[in-house]
Amino acid sequence: MSSIMEAKEIYDGHADLWVRHDPILLSDYSARPRVLELCGDVEGLTILDLGCGEGYVGRQLAKRGAASVAGYDVSSGMIAGAEQAAAAQRLDHLTYAVSDLRKAEFGDASQPVDMVIAVFLFNYMDTASMSRILDRVRKVLKPGGRFIFTVPHPLLPYIKPAEKPFYMRAEGGYLSSVDVPFPGRIWRRDGESVEVQAVHKTFTTYFSALNAAGFTRMPHVEELHITADHVALDPDFFGPLADLPLHVAFSLTS
Ligand SMILES: C[S@@+](CC[C@H](N)C(=O)[O-])C[C@H]1O[C@@H](n2cnc3c(N)ncnc32)[C@H](O)[C@@H]1O
């Protein structure tokens, strides 16, 4: 069985391919616009962005009026890209820290925030690490605060061949492979691609971990996919993904 690859290695190695100002990665079309919609009106909100990468989502939240966005990422390459982009765009209410969220504390429980997001973070860690982060999210969110996160769809590795423009390759059975790392790759529309990883979890894994962390209200859950508009825009790129669930978005209230 392969071991969980260190996200730092994956992301420091190709941070330059992630840095972007306009949508180019598949998930910039299939996931991030919906994440921003789920965030809703962020005017004046304080936000933590866990696994912020080079800051693509946080910059958009800042431009939509967030009072502050604090990004954390284990990859110093990604954080360097985020800092450069924020400086170039004079977004001085964005702050960044290099941090391995599996081990380090984040946020300040004495000054809880309005919203926490984690866009494709939990697929880089096992259930125990995710659960520790979920506990901390509960502590740093205000009562009534919102937590929005996305992960690869748990079934995708079982229903989609390992081909472009996105795949996660199953390395074992659906139920028996929880916490097994599945290798994956996601393409950009310009033909470049980046390595990704899905440490496998089932829907039961997510719901049980959320419940154990005290998120006891019914979450809003969406299976994210491409649309007919995407296929019309670029049939070669998006066409192979028609009718497939690609990612899952969870939106919770503390
Ligand atoms: C798929 S990228 C997504 C980046 C960003 N959220 C976005 O949507 O553009 C996943 C990010 O999670 C970060 N990451 C993975 N494991 C982490 C950990 N243990 N602590 C902090 N960041 C981590 C990676 O370095 C990477 O930047």
Image (cartoon, helix red, strand yellow):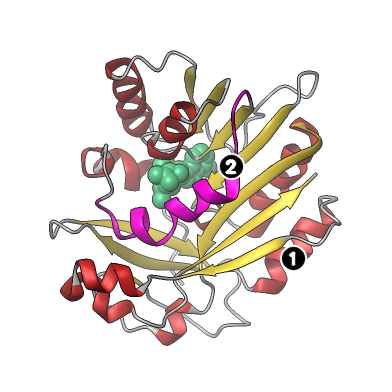
Report if residue 43 lies within the magenta region: yes
Report if residue 221 lies within the magenta region: no
Residue 9 image offset from top left, x and y in percent? 34, 44
Q: Which residues are magenta?
A: 24-44
Please determine whether, in this image, residue 64 is positioned above or below residue 147.
above
User: Looking at the image, in which quadrant does ligand 1 appear?
Assistant: top left
Whether residue 9 is visible here, answered yes or no, is: yes
Task: Indicate which disc residue 32 carries.
Answer: none
Tell me which residue sits at (57%, 76%) in the image.
177
Tell me which residue sits at (24%, 51%) in the image.
24
Q: Secondary structure at mark 2?
A: strand
Q: Quadrant of the C terminus?
A: top right
Please determine whether, in this image, residue 35 is positioned above or below residue 105.
below
- Classify 10 Å Cα crowding around label 2: few (below 14), some (14-19), many (20 and above): many
Residue that label 1 marks: 207
Q: Amino acid at mark 2?
A: Ile
Q: Is the shortest distance between ligand 1 and the CB of mark 2 under 8 Å?
A: yes
Please tell me in which quadrant of the rendered image residue 235 appears. bottom left
